[in-house]
Image (cartoon, rainbow, N blue to C red):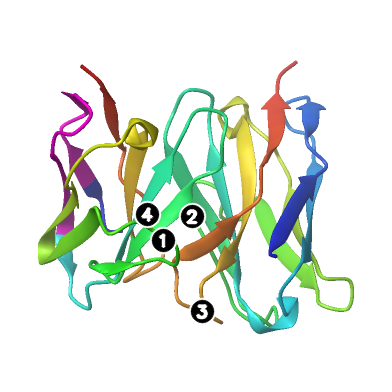
Amino acid sequence: QVQLVESGGGVVQPGRSLRLSCAASGFTFSSYGMHWVRQAPGKGLEWVAIISYDGSKKYYADSVKGRFTSSRDNSKNTLYLQMNSLRAEDTAVYYCAKDAHFWSGYIDYWGQGTLVTVSS
Amino acid sequence: EIVLTQSPGTLSLSSGERATLSCRASQSVSRSYLAWYQQKPGQAPRLLIYGASSRATGIPDRFSGSGSGTDFTLTISRLEPEDFAVYYCQQYENSPFTFGPGTKVDIK
């Protein structure tokens, strides 16, 4: 069965960096686009980024463009989110999620999320 | 960017009742690239509907989606106790693949 396990969350000071990882299993990772979606405490879902199956195409939400970078290592079945210049408003649970196809835009499986808290 | 608006914000109903949730887009989602997700407290979201009206694998047939253009609807024909949750719509017509703010279905 599909499993997505995020790691790397924690408490970080404003302006600092953090890298999230997502270990994928139970499907052919290299054949699917992957998303990052976040959810601030008590708030709704915010789509963050998508990366194509081969890493060649990436789109980002305006709120993170230029600060966050998504990448993947298909040899390790792992997705990454490099987050730089973090702000208090980036505080959220970050979900790694599998695209339903190689690049459709909707999500059929989600991880359980990792909490990132940006605070001094 | 396509902005999605969901209404009502909260829907208070009893088990066995019909729930009708609305999602309106700021511009046409011309290929019906709209999905619905369910989220329960402390859990990740779950895909219910894609392509505006296609049920995802394993989703009961009491869940149905309809609509096109800018107006979409999720209907739960008879609420079961496990259906009380927050429901989000998402458009995947264009990046950014935005979500609506959600509709909470709670117990009356």
Q: Which residue is mark 1?
A: B96
Q: Amino acid at mark 3?
A: Trp
Q: Amino acid at mark 2?
A: Ala
CB atoms of marks 1 and 3 within 8 Å: no
CB atoms of marks 1 and 4 within 8 Å: yes
Chain of the residue that carries numbered disc 3 in the rendered image: A
Q: How far is the residue under mark 1 from the one under mark 3? A: 13 Å
- Disc ID at residue A103: 3
Figure check: A57 above or below B4: below
A31 vs A2, nearest the viewer: A2
A63 vs A31, nearest the viewer: A31
Within the image, what quadrant is residue B51 found in?
A: bottom left
Q: Amino acid at mark 4?
A: Thr
x and y percent of residue A71 in the render? 74, 67
Is disc 2 placed on a helix, strand or loop?
loop
Q: Amino acid at mark 1?
A: Pro
Q: How far is the residue under mark 4 from the one under mark 3? A: 15 Å
Q: How far is the residue under mark 3 from the one under mark 2? A: 16 Å
x and y percent of residue B52 in the render? 24, 66
Q: How far is the residue under mark 1 from the one under mark 4? A: 6 Å
Figure check: A14 above or below A72: above
| Magenta segment | B5-26
Q: Which residue is mark 4?
A: B98
Q: Quadrant of the N terminus of chain B?
A: bottom left
Mark 4 packing: few (<14 Cα in 10 Å), some, or many (20+)? many
Q: Which residue is mark 2?
A: A61
